[in-house]
Amino acid sequence: MIKLIRRFLDWIYSEQSPKPAPQSNKTKDVVEKEKVSTKPKREGRSSEKIEKNNRPPKKTERKPRPRKIEPEVPVEKWEVSKFPVEQIEGKTRFHDLKLPDEIMHALSDLDFKYCTSIQEEVLPHTISGKDAVGQAQTGTGKTAAFLITIFNKLLNDGKKAKIPKSSPRALVVAPTRELAIQISKDAELLGKYLDLSVVVAYGGMDYKKQITRLKDGYVDLLIATPGRLIDFRQNNVVKLNMIEVLVLDEADRMLDMGFIPDVRKIVRFCPPKEKRQTLFFTATLNMTVERLAFSWTNDAVTVRIEPENVAAESVDQKVYITTGSEKIKLLYNIYTKLNLSKVMIFTNRKDEARKVAEELFKLGIEAKMISGDVDQKKRIKTLQQFKDGELNVLVATDVASRGLHIDGISHVINYSLPDDPEDYVHRIGRTGRAGASGISVSFASEFDSFNIPAIEKYIGQKFTYEDPTEDLLEELPAQSREMPKSQPQNRPGSGKRRGRPSGNRRNQGPRRHSDSRTPNQKRPPRKRNNPGEEKGRPNKPDSE
């Protein structure tokens, strides 16, 4: 029994004791090398991932996608033979002037076949390099005459490498922003196939953009208004010492607007008249304008195109005898009863134009106004809407009577007769253009009817006066809408004064007084000297 117990204990002890490791075939040297080379592994990451992350990224170059190579289409060179124009006795073709193909190509796109009267008389002289003084009414092709002259000269002279940046080779000075913009559009059409740079500069907008275009690139033709051009010249933005062709357009208008002192400065900045070509265009050539023309030109050719009728024959002119209080009723009923579509309304004053546009808008007619007080961007947008047919009625002052080429105007209404007879001719000239017929309606009231005799004398014909019928004097309907509230514009000179504190007066503390009086104490009565007690002045009798 005791032997069995001892065997049982020996068996238990033998199970709990460690077993010897199995013998391997490796030698002792190999086992020791493996112990030295093994390193503790990092927790969480394997050594392979660590080595992979430490490697620099491989730069893979993207292979360009194969592009389809399209065969080049040969551009056919345009030739004058593709623009055939028949010869008509008494008319001059543009072919007869031997202009470059680039200019003729643009003329063919515009379908300009024959020269107008002013172009027929001026272009043969200006193309040869002579100065010219031209008198013609608006809409007779003066703009195309001097643009063709400029482009022809610049093409014949070629590119000049010595001319620096911001130094234009040709300059056109226009009195108004609208006219400058219109000239630039005509230049784009006539210079469509020319490698020439055209820049327009005018006040009211895009000041920095205009500076960038003038400073960063070469300018072949610069079209500018006098004020903005003087500003750029004084700030060394533009230099005028390399001018080859100088054009003064609507010179009589610049004289009326008081721009002649600025124009004198501009002419002095340009080269002498012997070293430049000068073109001077005007609608009227009186003694003052003629004196200016010959002081700025050199042996110029004078061309006068006097129309048989100052007012266009294609415009039917009507005058209604009315009163100032009935004008708005007459205007509304004429527009609604006759179903007018595209109308321009002219007034003499800016406040009057604003009032007429607001009244028509309240009565449900889409009408907007442009004047010198309207922001330039808004004026351009309004004019574009009127050209595109989005706007039916445009109320304007005489700022829009010249230089605007808008097709399709059926009626021009003179809400107030102009003081200057020439403005009347320019106003009604907005209709009946390009061979179309038009109608001019004028309101003669107690405020402006005294201008009729001067207008009749200027146009050389008498008006036929009419009394408005009863249906044209019907009462106005109820106003259908109100004017939208517009935010006040930040104009120069407006806004808060400098040096004056802003904000609520309560948060600025008590008022400061220069003397020792309290805020509620009244100022003591001012002591007045008796007559004769003023220093240095004896007492004079009342009779003196």
Image (cartoon, rainbow, N blue to C red):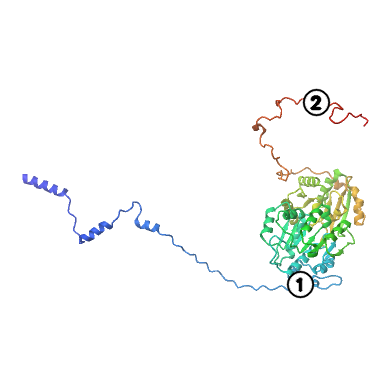
Quick one: label 1, few (<14), some, or many (20+) residues within 10 Å? some
Q: Nearer the viewer, residue 438 or 116?
A: 116
Foreground pick, 249 / 9? 249
- 44 vs 220: above or below: above
Q: What residue did someone put label 2 on?
A: 527
Q: Quadrant of residue 58?
A: bottom left
Viewport quadrant of the C terminus: top right
Q: Position of residue 14 (x, y in %)?
A: 14, 49
Residue sticking out furthest to the front = 536
Residue ID at (90%, 29%): 540
Point out residue 538 in the picture as x, y percentages from the top left corner.
Answer: 88, 29
Residue contact at pointers 1 and 2, CB within 8 angstroms: no
Three-letter residue code for mark 1? Phe
Q: Which residue is mark 1?
A: 83
Q: Residue at x 85, y 31 (%)?
A: 536
Pointer 2 local density, CA inside 10 Å: few below 14, some 14–19, many at least 20: few
Q: Amino acid at mark 2?
A: Lys
Q: Is residue 144 visible?
A: no
Residue at (80%, 63%) from the top-left corner? 273
**Front-most of 418 and 367?**
418
Judge left or right: residue 52 versus residue 229: left
